[in-house]
Amino acid sequence: MGFLGWIIIGIIAGFVAEKVTKSDHGLFTNLGVGLVGAFVGGYLADILKLQLAGGFIDTMIVATVGAILVLFVYQKIKS
């Protein structure tokens, strides 16, 4: 997946994570959270030995779950 694809996935994953965790961030924060979430989700999927096809939907799910975890931990540390 190219650079533009990762940006799109990052923005979408960050936006979904923002809504799930009832946070309020801007576009660039959503992008950052989504990209970090993609790394966290990918790392966890690897640890759990999940067999994913690697398509857009699988990548989106992994990135979104990772972004939700990142925001959850951030909110716990912040409060």
Image (cartoon, rainbow, N blue to C red):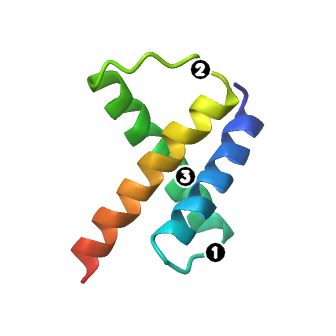
8 to 29, vertically: above or below: above
Q: State the residue at coordinates (76%, 38%).
A: 4
Image quadrant of residue 28? Answer: bottom right
Image quadrant of residue 78? Answer: bottom left
> In the rendering, which numbered label is found on residue 34?
3
Q: Gap between marks 1 and 3, in whole Å?
A: 12 Å
Q: Nearer the viewer, residue 76 or 52?
A: 52
> In the rendering, which numbered label is found on residue 54?
2
State the SS at label 3: helix
Q: Is residue 39 visible?
A: yes
Q: Nearer the viewer, residue 76 or 57?
A: 57
Pointer 1 residue: 26
The x and y percentages for residue 17 are 52, 61
27 to 67, vertically: above or below: below
State the SS at label 1: loop
The answer to whether marks 3 and 2 mark residues whose Cβ atoms lie closer than 8 Å is no
Q: Residues within 10 Å of mark 1 (few under 14, many from 20)?
A: few
